[in-house]
Amino acid sequence: MKCKKALALLLAAVLTAGILAGCASSASSGSERRLGSFQAVTLDGGTFTQADIAGKDVTIINFWGTFCAPCIAEMPDLAAFAKALPDNVQLITVCIDAAGGVQTAQDLLDQAGYEGVTLVGGDGDFQEVLGEIQAVPTTIFVDAKGNQVGSEILGRQADLAGTFLAAVNEALKAGGKAEISLEQ
């Protein structure tokens, strides 16, 4: 009896640890996603559409939640990475639970120093992509046509800048574009 209880507790602890860790810290092939036709609402009440993606060679989209400790912990690194990107690459975030807590999301972004675009809802392809996200943080990379390029990145990354830069350069190379380096 004691052995069964101990085994059940151990299994519960392992499952809980996996959930709290933000799933995984490796890349996953995921399904191919497309943001071809959509209109999304930004945290500040503006709109973001496929035209905003079309203006960049690569758009990095980081999905996160205000309840997610790994998401919040990586936000300062995301902010620094976004500021170091050249003009042909952008990083945006999607707060999956901000619709009910816009101020909480804004406070977390402000504390992290993130000054970019954060989406909080939308329609069309945005809704389909959002429905496919199964864990946060999850980051995907899309080209100017809105097609996902490369693998999604799941979980908080120990070397966010290095991991994301490699994925961006893979996406640029796939599109016949020159690789980038981060501004210092």
Image: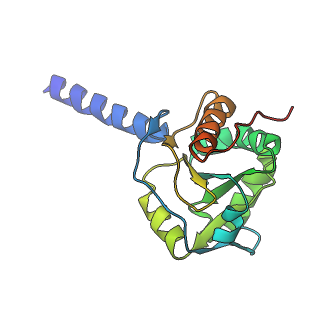
Instruction: Give the answer, above or below, for where 59 lies relative to 180.
Output: below
Identify which residue is drawn at 73% across, 64% down: 103
Along the horizontal axis of the image, is 53 left or right of 12?
right
At a point 55% along the width and 69% down the height, the residue shown is 36
Toward which corner of the image does residue 49 lie, by quadrant? bottom right
Determine the residue located farthest toward the left in the rendered image.
Answer: 1
Instruction: State which quarter of the image contains the C terminus.
Output: top right
Residue situated in front as seen by the camera: 173 or 116: 173
Q: How is the image coloured?
A: rainbow
Q: Nearer the viewer, residue 170 or 118?
A: 170
Q: Where, quadrant-wise, is the N terminus in this rendering?
A: top left
Q: Left or right: where does residue 32 sit relative to residue 178?
A: left
Q: Position of residue 144 (x, y in %)?
A: 64, 59
Whether residue 63 can be seen here: no
Q: Closest to the observer: 176 or 151?
A: 176
Which image quarter: residue 73? top right
State whether residue 13 is above or below residue 3: below
Q: How far from the left and from the top, in percent, is residue 76?
A: 74, 40
- Name the residue at the front extreme: 176
Q: Residue at x 35, y 31 (%)?
A: 14
The residue lying toward the viewer, choosing from 11 and 64, is 64
Q: Residue 99's quadrant in the figure?
A: bottom right
Residue 21 lies, in percent from the top left, at 49, 36
Residue drawn 69% across the image and 67% down it? 102
x and y, in percent, of residue 87 in the image: 81, 50
**Residue 93 position (above or below residue 100):** above
Residue 148 seen: yes
Number of numbered labels in the structure image: 0
